[in-house]
Image (cartoon, rainbow, N blue to C red):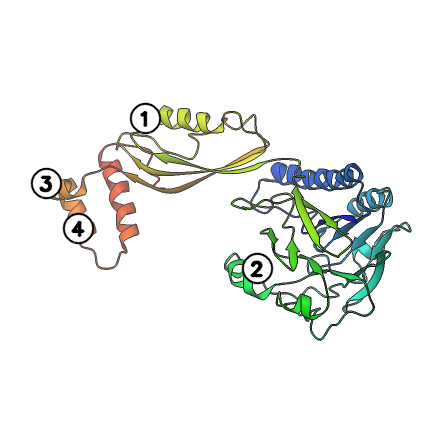
């Protein structure tokens, strides 16, 4: 048997980090990705499509999204099984309640695992989050019933991986241990919630198929799952994202003027498509004009360019300048000896002051 599994698409995500035009592009890209998932299911001739939650964001979805998802899944040409998560929880006003589903779409509605027959000898157990938080573990006290290859589909937090995800701001929902899966009699569990893909012995986290922010790593996409006659599960990750998201650094070193910054940035961005976050940091010579407009216009060939400045230092030799018997030397000594300023604030005050003393107008310290 062959299945397609995905999760955590987050349709209608606000993309708060992006300017409004870019956020709209990213939301349309998520729709394109869902269409590619359904197309992939047809190409691979899978028997069913499984979504392990967070298909959309409950607080942001629109009637247009209801119509889009309804139309896409009703035309999928195969069964579609949906297990609502904490962001797309099953409530009276949810997308799942508003859509007019065809007979091929099944939304799990209980907060306890319930079975459907995928095929002769293959049974899928699914459950739903019915609130945005405080959902108990679906595997707590659960045991399968009947002779079959038993699979599970739900949205939850595997405990051994939680600390890593917690550091990224994730909260636990429907927690479980990997060992709970075979103990329950399940051959495998397909799980959503963690955005970092994990293909483990007893469970699969597909991860979000289209990046939602920068810095996301791992081989993410839709997972094509094959189950042989003995219930052995094999998996292949297939890329479905409609656009690329890149996270790059521009390290300033040996820079003598602002046009060198633009040239290095242009070289980094050359040939890329999609969305790029460019982090600029490093040390420049005192005469270099570094300001937030220095890279304007370089990302016109991209869907979006997000520039952020890290710590940029100016190559003043403060130890030598401090010894000067001048206004400049006295200024540095006074600031460095100030007890009520931390080191970063001292640096900012000194560099701003030195630029002012040099007659510079670009006084912003990044």
The reply to whether callout 3 and callout 2 are in contact (CB within 8 Å) is no
Question: Secondary structure beneath disc 4?
Answer: helix
Q: Is residue 252 above or below residue 107?
A: above
Return the disc, 3 or 2, that comes first in the chain's sequence. 2
Name the spot of residue 215 as percent of width and height, x first.
51, 45
Return the disc, 4 or 2, that comes first in the chain's sequence. 2
Residue most extreme to the left: 325
- Residue at 75% across / 39% down in the picture? 40
Return the disc, 1 or 4, that comes first in the chain's sequence. 1
Q: Which residue is mark 1?
A: 257
Residue most extreme to the right: 103
Instruction: Give me the disc on residue 170.
Output: 2
Q: Quadrant of residue 290?
A: top left
Distance CA(mark 3)–CA(mark 4)? 13 Å
Instruction: Give me the disc on residue 334.
Output: 4
Name the spot of residue 163 as percent of width and height, x first.
51, 63
- Residue at 18% across / 39% down in the picture? 317
Q: Quadrant of the C terminus?
A: top left
Distance CA(mark 2)–CA(mark 1)? 42 Å
* Camera-nearest label, 2 or 1: 2
Question: Secondary structure beneath disc 3?
Answer: loop
Judging depth in this view, the residue of 151 and 363 nearest the camera is 151
Q: Quadrant of residue 360?
A: top left
Distance CA(mark 1)–CA(mark 3)? 27 Å
Distance CA(mark 3)–CA(mark 2)? 53 Å
């Amino acid at each position: 048997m062959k299945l397609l599994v995905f999760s955590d698409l987050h349709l209608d995500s606000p993309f708060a980090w992006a300017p409004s035009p870019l956020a709209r592009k990213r939301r349309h890209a998520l729709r394109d990705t869902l269409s590619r998932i359904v197309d992939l299911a047809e190409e691979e001739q899978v028997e069913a499509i499984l979504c392990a939650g967070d298909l959309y964001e409950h607080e942001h979805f629109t009637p247009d999204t209801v119509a889009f998802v309804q139309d896409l899944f009703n035309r999928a040409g195969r069964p579609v099984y949906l297990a609502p998560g904490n962001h797309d929880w099953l409530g009276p006003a949810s997308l799942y309640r508003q859509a007019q589903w065809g007979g091929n779409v099944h939304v799990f509605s209980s907060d306890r695992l319930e079975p459907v027959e995928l095929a002769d000898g293959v049974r899928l157990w699914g459950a739903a989050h019915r609130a945005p938080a405080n959902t108990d573990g679906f595997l707590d006290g659960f045991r399968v019933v009947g002779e079959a290859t038993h699979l599970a589909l739900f949205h939850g937090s595997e405990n051994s991986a939680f600390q890593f995800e917690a550091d990224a701001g994730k909260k636990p929902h429907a927690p479980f241990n990997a060992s709970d899966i075979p103990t329950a009699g399940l051959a495998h569990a397909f799980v959503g919630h963690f955005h970092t893909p994990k293909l483990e012995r007893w469970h699969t986290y597909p991860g979000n198929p289209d990046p939602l922010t920068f810095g996301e790593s791992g081989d993410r996409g839709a997972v094509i799952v094959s189950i042989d006659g003995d219930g052995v599960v094999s998996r292949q990750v297939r890329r479905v994202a409609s656009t690329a998201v890149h996270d790059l650094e521009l390290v300033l070193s040996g820079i003598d003027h602002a046009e060198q910054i633009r040239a290095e940035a242009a070289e980094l961005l050359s040939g890329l498509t999609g969305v790029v976050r460019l982090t600029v940091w490093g040390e420049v010579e005192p005469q270099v004009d570094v300001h937030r407009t220095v890279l304007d216009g370089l990302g016109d060939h991209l869907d979006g360019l997000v520039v952020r400045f890290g710590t940029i230092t100016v190559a003043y030799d403060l130890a030598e300048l401090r010894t000067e018997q001048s206004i400049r030397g006295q200024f540095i000594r006074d600031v460095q000896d100030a007890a009520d300023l931390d080191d970063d604030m001292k640096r900012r005050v000194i560099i701003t002051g030195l630029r002012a003393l040099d007659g510079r107008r670009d006084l912003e310290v990044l």
